[in-house]
Image (spheres, rainbow, N blue to C red):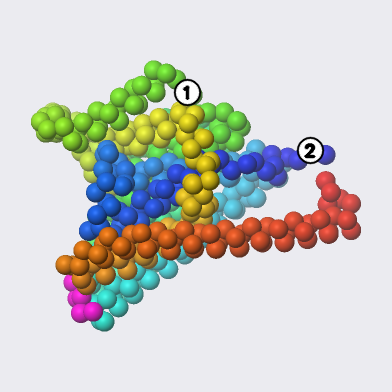
Amino acid sequence: MSRPETQMRRPRDSRIDFFRGLLLWMIFVDHVPGNPYEHWATIRNWGFSDAAESFFIISGIAAGIAYSGRFATWRDTGLWPAIAPMWKRSWVLYLSHIFLTVAGIAIFALGAEALGLVELLTKNNLKQVFQNTAQAIIGIVTLGHQIGYMNILPAYSVLLLAAPFAILIGQRAPRLLLIGSVLLWFATGLWRWNLPAYPNAGGWFFNPFAWQLIFVVGLLTGIAFRRGERFVPVNRALFWVAAGWLALVLAWRYVPEFGPAMNRGMAWLAGQGFPFHITSHDKTYLPFLRMTHALALVYVVSCLPVVTTLTAQRWGEPLRVMGRQGLLIFSAGALLSYVGQTLIAWQPDNALIPWLYIPAGTVALVLLAWAADWKRRAGKAGTRALTVKDSRADPLAAE
């Protein structure tokens, strides 16, 4: 008997694991300000977007691949078996965020107590925690108060709550979902919609109403990929438009006179009444310039056959294994970034600390990922052995 789609095993795409691991490493580097690698080794040095935008796109792709198959037979099995794994994952992300927040606070508190670094108590949005503790705790639990460098997971958790409904629409009417997503992004920037922060004024740093657009693009890409298709086909003209935009942005960043001239042009457009998320770089609202840079980068990379070959090479296994253990590595990297910030604040004149900490942290992340991957593979081997044993006793299990 042939297996239904929800049970078929598909080989992992090496590109997804490789680039997710690479992006997680870049996030770790960017989250330790003051290290020399942040000035050349991460995406933000080569354009408007940084690793966060690409990470959201790849997360959407991974979600589309992992979860959309369950919705193909929902009329026979019911919706809940398809929705439940996504909402369970959303809950895991919420709990992980709460743990990381508390651990991050503890790391800075320890630095303040043991090393006399009282300035840590007001960095990374921690001021409310130590000066307005009761309200800050309420805000942490309700996701209204998010500390710096640990605020990606809440947005992803919220997006996973909505993702089942997006998949249902995306499988039947992908263009309709994309149009609705673009309209929501535009309205969000136009009217400054956001989830509220508490007890601080303002809203979430990663505004889910805006950032849902690149997640949805990734989700639609993953849904199509699972069917053996491309959501955005390879097209020579589109490829060169995307590549040209990447080159223009690079020149915008680094060519003397050109960049300031472009900035003056954006200021002029803003003065003519263009919406701020079209002309600005405000990360919270996923502005047009950052968004299109990230989408162009992902599209160009996805069109190059050599990328598939390179990402499958043996030398890329450390990054692939980090990508396979995404949540664990993000969490470990977030905690290591707080430790790194504490050490740099403790010895600001010691140049060796920022030079050595990133390589040491990278080794630690790779070893942790390998240990977790070994444990996962050992668990799967045990499960397969048990399944074979059970199938011999129960003929129906062989189906």
> Is 394 rendered above or below residue 82?
below
| Discs 2/1, front | 1
> Is 128 rendered above or below residue 188?
below
- Judge from the rendering whether residue 35 lies leftward or rightward of residue 162; answer left or right: left
**Is residue 75 among the parts visible in the rendering?**
no
Q: Residue 176 in the image: x percent, y percent?
A: 47, 29
Name the residue nearer the viewer: 77 or 23: 23
**Callout 2: few (<14), some (14-19), or many (20+) C-alpha neighbours within 10 Å?**
few
Q: Residue at x 55, y 62 (%)?
A: 372
- Judge from the rendering whether residue 45 lies leftward or rightward of residue 261; answer left or right: right
Is 27 part of what is drawn in magenta?
no
* Residue bearing mark 2: 2
* Quarter-of-image position of residue 388: bottom right
**Is residue 96 among the parts visible in the rendering?**
yes
In terms of secondary structure, where does tag 1 sit?
loop
Mark 2 / mark 1, whichever is N-terminal: 2
* Residue bearing mark 1: 234
Whether pointer 2 and pointer 1 mark residues with C-beta atoms closer than 8 Å, the reply is no
Q: Which residues are magenta?
A: 115-119
* Quarter-of-image position of residue 130: bottom left
> Is 233 rendered above or below residue 254?
above
Q: Residue at x 37, y 71 (%)?
A: 102
Name the residue nearer the viewer: 256 or 88: 256
**Callout 1: few (<14), some (14-19), or many (20+) C-alpha neighbours within 10 Å?**
some
Q: Main secondary structure of the magenta part?
A: helix
Three-letter code, disc 1: Val
Q: Residue 101 in the image: x percent, y percent?
A: 37, 67
Q: Residue 109 in the image: x percent, y percent?
A: 28, 76
Q: How many marks?
A: 2
Q: Residue at x 74, y 56 (%)?
A: 384
Three-letter code, disc 2: Ser
